[in-house]
Image (tube, rainbow, N blue to C red):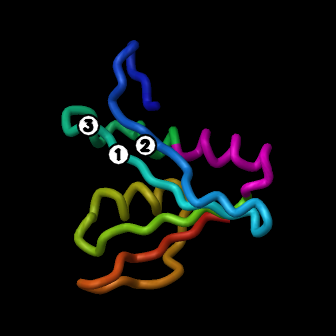
Amino acid sequence: MIDVAGECVGEVGLSDIDQRRGAALIGWWVAAGHRGNGYATEAIGRLADAAVGFGVHTLVAQIGVANEASIHIATRAGFTLLRAGDDATPHVYVRR
């Protein structure tokens, strides 16, 4: 949960954790009135640091090609483009 002054303004979470490979999918959202403040970027960094503690060192983000805000967040959070998407498939970004 992304907490700002006691209010939940967003969320960052992991799914499809593969401990054998040390990888997981990551996703995030931020409420419209709180976007552009760096909350997601900061929360992603904290979650990435915590994930290393339980063996996850590779995070994968699947981002729709039209989702420019999440593409910007991923880049700011240290992700690099692994595979470009198209109208039918999302971009795939990775952070190691």
Q: Quadrant of the C terminus?
A: bottom right
Q: Identity of the amino acid at label 1? A: Trp
- Return the residue at label 2: 40
Neighbours of disc 3 within 10 Å: few (<14), some (14-19), many (20+): few
User: At x 20% / y 33%, what residue is drawn?
Assistant: 33
Residue 53 relative to residue 61: left or right: right
User: At x 44% / y 31%, what residue is drawn?
Assistant: 2
- Return the residue at label 3: 31
- Residue 47 quadrant: top right
Q: Is residue 60 above or below residue 88?
A: above
Residue 25 relative to residue 96: left or right: left
Q: Identity of the amino acid at label 2? A: Ala
Which label is found at residue 29?
A: 1
User: At x 47% / y 43%, what residue is drawn?
Assistant: 12
Looking at the rendering, the stretch of residues picked out in magenta corresponds to 44-56
Q: Position of residue 41 (x, y in %)?
A: 47, 46
User: At x 36% / y 83%, what residue is drawn?
Assistant: 85
